[in-house]
Amino acid sequence: TILLETATTKKASDIHIEHLASGRRIRMRINGVLKRFQHESDIGENLIHKIKLVSEMDIAVSRSPQDGHFQYSNKRGEKFDLRTSTVPGIYGEKVVIRLLPTLPVTFSIDQLNFSATFINAIRKVLSKKSGMILFTGPTGSGKTTSLYAILNELISESLNIITIEDPVEYRVDSITQVSVNQTTGVTFATALKSFLRQDPDVILVGE
């Protein structure tokens, strides 16, 4: 609870829990930069076990990567979807938790601190009948936020907008959103193939 409260208060995008030769290390990615969590002594040795349990992972498996998820509400009533991933390191499992706020998407391009020149360029591209916009950058740099701000410019009753993401980070009622699910065979390739039969106007690929 201490870990998640701190992460949500500091608006961290990810939590990294690692086992090193020198011991355990916990870091949070805040504004794109990993910073060490200063209260590691308060975190019990069974932390990874608990995370795997609430994420519906197999707690008996520690030598193979696993993915899971769970939900969390902090003391301020903010709700989050948490996506968890484990990999087997030579000193023990590493867990990364991605924190995804479940707030409605209300932001616009004008709120992203882009220059006026860049915003005008984006809107010029959006006015075209066809084309592609690519956003690239490191984890937590704002790729998905930027893309959803752009979608907010496009959403209308006259457009069929579909997304395929891994995972879906923001919920929007007026568009169709699909999350990658390897277990059920929903991959980027299979989803995109199906999308082309769905009469799409706009497709977002979140990966």
Image (cartoon, rainbow, N blue to C red):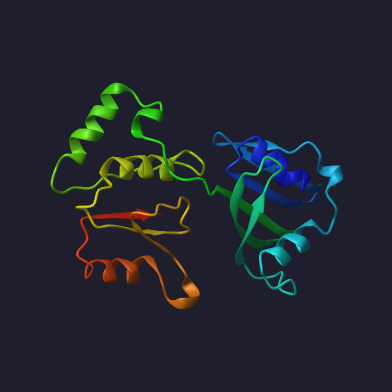
Q: Is residue 120 above or below residue 75?
A: above
Q: Position of residue 139 (x, y in %)?
A: 51, 44
Q: Is residue 3 above or below residue 160?
A: above
Name the side, left or right, on which 204 lies relative to 169: left
Name the side, left or right, on which 154 lies relative to 49: left
Q: Position of residue 151 (x, y in %)?
A: 32, 45
Name the side, left or right, on which 24 lies relative to 79: right
- Identify which residue is drawn at 25% across, 34% down: 122
- Identify which residue is drawn at 65% across, 41% down: 8
Residue at the outermost bottom position: 184
Q: Is residue 155 above or below residue 91?
A: above
Q: Position of residue 176 (x, y in %)?
A: 34, 60
- Identify which residue is drawn at 28% across, 40% down: 153
Q: Is residue 40 above or below residue 158?
A: above
User: Taking the image as drawn, is residue 124 in sight?
Assistant: yes
Q: Position of residue 158 (x, y in %)?
A: 19, 52
- Identify which residue is drawn at 30% across, 66% down: 192
Q: Quadrant of the C terminus?
A: bottom left
